[in-house]
Amino acid sequence: MIREDLTVVDHTLVAEDTYQLILCGRMVHDIKQPGQFVHIRTSTDEYLRRPVSISDYNIDEETITLLYKVIGKGTKALTAYQIGDSLDVLGPGGRGFPVKARPGENVLLTGGGIGVPPLYRLARELYEKGADLTIILGFQSIRHAFLKSEFQQYGSVYIMTDDGTSGNKGFVTDGIAGMSGSFDRYYTCGPTPMLKAVVKQLGDTEGYISMEERMGCGIGACFACVVPSHDEKGYKRICCDGPVFHHKEVVLT
Amino acid sequence: MIREDLTVVDHTLVAEDTYQLILCGRMVHDIKQPGQFVHIRTSTDEYLRRPVSISDYNIDEETITLLYKVIGKGTKALTAYQIGDSLDVLGPGGRGFPVKARPGENVLLTGGGIGVPPLYRLARELYEKGADLTIILGFQSIRHAFLKSEFQQYGSVYIMTDDGTSGNKGFVTDGIAGMSGSFDRYYTCGPTPMLKAVVKQLGDTEGYISMEERMGCGIGACFACVVPSHDEKGYKRICCDGPVFHHKEVVLT
Amino acid sequence: MNTMIQLPGLSLKNPIMPASGCFGFGREYARFYPLAELGAVIMKAATGEKRYGNPTPRVAESTGGMLNAIGLQNPGVESIIQEEIPFLKAQQVPIIANVAGSTVEEYVEVAEKISSHVDALELNISCPNVKEGGVQFGMDPVLAEDVTRRVVQVSRVPVYVKLSPNVSDIVVMAKAAERGGASGLSMINTLTAMRIDPSSRKPVLSNGTGGLSGAALKPVSIRMIHQVYPKVAIPIIGMGGIETAADIVEYLLAGASAVAVGSANFKNPLICRELVEQLPETLHHYGFQSVEEAVGGAHRESVEAGLLRP
Amino acid sequence: MNTMIQLPGLSLKNPIMPASGCFGFGREYARFYPLAELGAVIMKAATGEKRYGNPTPRVAESTGGMLNAIGLQNPGVESIIQEEIPFLKAQQVPIIANVAGSTVEEYVEVAEKISSHVDALELNISCPNVKEGGVQFGMDPVLAEDVTRRVVQVSRVPVYVKLSPNVSDIVVMAKAAERGGASGLSMINTLTAMRIDPSSRKPVLSNGTGGLSGAALKPVSIRMIHQVYPKVAIPIIGMGGIETAADIVEYLLAGASAVAVGSANFKNPLICRELVEQLPETLHHYGFQSVEEAVGGAHRESVEAGLLRP
Ligand SMILES: Cc1cc2nc3c(=O)[nH]c(=O)nc-3n(C[C@H](O)[C@H](O)[C@H](O)COP(=O)(O)OP(=O)(O)OC[C@H]3O[C@@H](n4cnc5c(N)ncnc54)[C@H](O)[C@@H]3O)c2cc1C
Ligand SMILES: Cc1cc2nc3c(=O)[nH]c(=O)nc-3n(C[C@H](O)[C@H](O)[C@H](O)COP(=O)(O)OP(=O)(O)OC[C@H]3O[C@@H](n4cnc5c(N)ncnc54)[C@H](O)[C@@H]3O)c2cc1C
Ligand SMILES: Cc1cc2nc3c(=O)[nH]c(=O)nc-3n(C[C@H](O)[C@H](O)[C@H](O)COP(=O)(O)O)c2cc1C
Ligand SMILES: Cc1cc2nc3c(=O)[nH]c(=O)nc-3n(C[C@H](O)[C@H](O)[C@H](O)COP(=O)(O)O)c2cc1C
Ligand code: FES
Ligand code: FES
């Protein structure tokens, strides 16, 4: 984990209010797993940093790819950065997805909205290990969908939209319900209500969930980002013990 | 008085830490006298606006020329504006110098540091009325001096520097003391201690002084910028009753 | 969108008014827009005699806000009645007089004189920038109740008591004002603060301390209004750091029935007019049909209602 | 430049330490720089038993600052002694334990247990984010004096009482702590505040209120330290919104002998190290030969001295 001024090498709109931001710097060498995140000082106007997942990276080119959606002040401020500008980033943070797969295993990936990006690098690594991937991505509407064709390189992709403008109408859980057969393992990322529904639906299947919570420090020191856990300590910090947890580690409320 | 987004048409370094900023907009049509000022929102980081005198203006080109010195946060932020950028300006504010001169009258202009700029347009207008101008400008050192040759078009210019690196060593008051003959009228602008010394030195000569004070609103509503006065009301607001006063109107402390 | 709001003595076409001390007596801003567009105007403080106030510098910046130590400079109640109120009356806008003093007698005298010329009084027991009176009355519930009662007795119009945030328990102060007969509360005045200049090694303001206002103050004011709203039966005029129409919605939800905009007028002299323009669409955006509906909303909101709204 | 400062129980090589709750127990920041560079480390609050704290969200932004309602989450005093203090000891940096509790008994218990393992205690009677204890003790001088006295009795190391800004009269609280036997004061904790989200119509923090920290708070803290300094004989650790070395000079001039840096660690995890590096040249720039010389400077400054300095 380092604090570094990364250089913007690309910044494009990929869907409604959704941007792909490619940053260059040495930080990339510290990435250990898909699903880790960076903590960004979006501008001097925002007092707190903003956590954004690493969607992909390239060691040779020393680049990190982020995909973010404009939600409020901080993500709005991010849109102003242009190629060549530098951005104050802390990272890579947290523990990502354990890339577990034997050839031929059926693995399910489900992501909702801005929960989709961290699954992208994961998909590639699971695919390279020979897993058979079913990928269900949920978006508000066709206008908000992104990364669909990129995911198709690695498995069967099903799109769910709230309004049915792309793929099937419904939530990712409706998508899961429509699947035949069972999964050896699943990985999911999205808003907590979605995670809860997915975990419930998939019962005892081995699962890994990536969580979101408002953060202060982003490195484990302030206890802003906790989630109750089943162990003796009673809590996990999403920024450093997570954001990815085994589905039985934490209590989703 | 209007609030307008003015466009930067020129911005150059003219002396150490001192910049000339030329702004374009309709505001120029409201200027009534030399010595009025504009109230600038230097950036979103500064909570209060910054008052800067109008040094010159051009009705045809719709430009206003300012000269400012970098003192702190706000003036530092100003330096970042580039040609084509727009700047949130309130103005023109206050009452400037009454341009009184009959041909052949001896008129003295004295300015110290950032008190020099508002005298520039005044010098031209007095010159056009036929006055005989003696202009004493005080600066910290030769590196800080500006507008010297421009003033020379309109009268005899004497430079005083604190360290003697240009003109004579000493304060503007030393310069005045060295002058032979008397003046029909004087105009002065600079820090309050300088104004006080000049007013004292020139006794009963008709004089106009331009004052500085920290401002809130800049338009007369908040009472931040008062100076005690000799009238029944007991005070004057520098932002709207001034910044220019007859030397007997206000109490310099 | 219905932005009207009825408060004791005040029938406001919208809930937005400039805060006392940040708008003088309206003349300067009237050059920027017709004051009739405002819900009301709260005038600069009035005292019995004219006051010069504190030495300069009287204002300074701080992160997200500013400090002021004007010290209640004003031309005195008689002059305000003769010179200033007629101008404001001609603008066709409800007028609130901010009443200050060093002693209970002075408060009573000012209230008595000025109340027949305005629509409501704002009793300023919270100015941190004067040696006598001011915030002393605003930090002690017994004194606050007493001065409120005596002013209410002589006033011909409803009295709004302006509370100070410089207290341990704002609810105690609010209730004291209510017991004293206040028709409403005005929350809040500035928080006592100081900046020291490392170069001069002395406080930036010549008065030493000043009052902190602006956006930095907003979360403190919101908290206090949220605390007071369920504990009193009188309406609240909210203020502190309002800069956007969304800020106004936040104040209404916390429990304010109307709001005042102070320091932001210095950044943008047109701010009050712009907020008046923007408020209807902002209320609509957040799903409200009227100002009234939003007042105190945070106290009524259920989890279920939240889920139903997009 | 002499940046050393001697305080009861603490021999600091520089006056800079991370503030309680903003630095955990040091492990995370130790990955960024050696903690031995710091004057001292103030640990996250310790209570008798482990605590989970409040539901999330626990943090929010506000203009120039942030709100938090962590609610004293910590692993409990025993676990801190066994798991955390050994790590910090190995870093060779003076340790201050922040002691919290719901009852006087709990404060006493925690102090008794932890005091033999650290260099000083910071008695936290000012946490606004817990239902019991916390700021209740910090708003009543009688309770404050009592809990201070009982903690001082059992502590083997000097006790610094951490004051709350949520009071009408900070001097009364400071004197109560001094009477109770405090060796020093820590000023200040956060100011109770709230933000309401106009979309959800509810407070942003699930606890409702939270504590305001960051630059927005600085002028309030400077004012309080400036008020307290001439009225007590014990040293003050100053905090609230420190982000630059010039801010530290401002705190020293107001009357602090050392400072703590809180929320700014979240913006920049290297901030404390950078301030340690910058402080000597900043002090020099403002004409000081040592930290000591600047302490309380604003109270001694004469007009003449100011004129002599460039
Ligand atoms: C581990 C992690 C990974 C994430 N990865 C991505 C990603 O890859 N792409 C993406 O678009 N978004 C991602 N998010 C969500 C992203 O952090 C928020 O959308 C963003 O912080 C919103 O900031 P804002 O200023 O635009 O919104 P505002 O609502 O103005 O933010 C106000 C405050 O709330 C916090 N906040 C708001 N929404 C969230 C949220 N959903 N999660 C955490 N904090 C929030 C902000 O950080 C800020 O402190 C991730 C969040 C976490 C915790
Ligand atoms: C009527 C008038 C005309 C002026 N004309 C000019 C000009 O033509 N050129 C020029 O360079 N400067 C001029 N000044 C001074 C200029 O306003 C200050 O130098 C500037 O405000 C400093 O801001 P800062 O943020 O850089 O400094 P900081 O010291 O960081 O400012 C902090 C605060 O103090 C105020 N302040 C600081 N110095 C002064 C000062 N001397 N007068 C008033 N307020 C001050 C700032 O406005 C701000 O609110 C004028 C001032 C007045 C009142
Ligand atoms: C320059 C200035 C002068 C003020 N004068 C008064 C006053 O005379 N009477 C009063 O009750 N409040 C006065 N206030 C306080 C404001 O009315 C208001 O309560 C406070 O500034 C918070 O609002 P804001 O953050 O929008 O400025 C003054 C504030 C400022 C900034
Ligand atoms: C996230 C967070 C947690 C805190 N936890 C504690 C705590 O456990 N004990 C305590 O005494 N103060 C705590 N504080 C208060 C700080 O120690 C400090 O007094 C305050 O934040 C002001 O300093 P700052 O503006 O530099 O943050 C906490 C502050 C923050 C922001
Ligand atoms: S954000 Fe500080 S512990 Fe996770
Ligand atoms: S700056 Fe407000 S009255 Fe002059």
Image: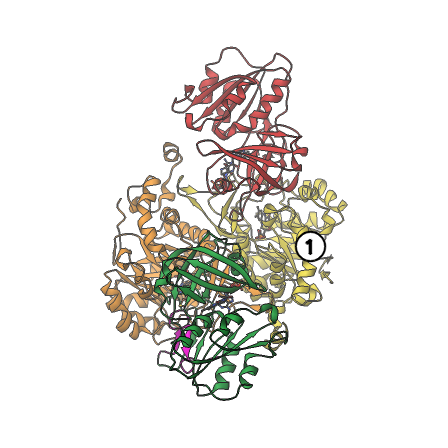
Chain colours: A red, B green, C orange, D yellow
Quarter placement of the N terminus of chain B: bottom left
Q: Which residue is mark 1?
A: D276
Q: Nearer the viewer, residue B112 or C276?
A: B112
Query: Residue C141 colored magenta?
Result: no
**Can residue D230 be seen here?**
no
Check disc 1 and report its element: helix, strand or loop: helix
Badge count: 1
Q: Quadrant of residue D215?
A: bottom right
Relative horizontal placement of residue D21, taking residue A14 as reference (left or right): right
Q: Quadrant of residue A182?
A: top right
* Residue at 66% over, 51% down: D272
| Position in image of residue C279 (x %, y %) | 32, 47
Subunit under mark 1: D
Q: Nearer the viewer, residue A249 or D31?
A: D31
| Position in image of residue A138 (x %, y %) | 46, 24
Mark 1 beta carbon near ligand 4 (under 8 Å): no
| Position in image of residue D284 (x %, y %) | 68, 64
Relative horizontal placement of residue A15, taking residue D237 as reference (left or right): left
| Position in image of residue A142 (x %, y %) | 42, 25
**At label 1, which amino acid type do we have?**
Val
What range of the chain is rendered magenta? Answer: B233-253
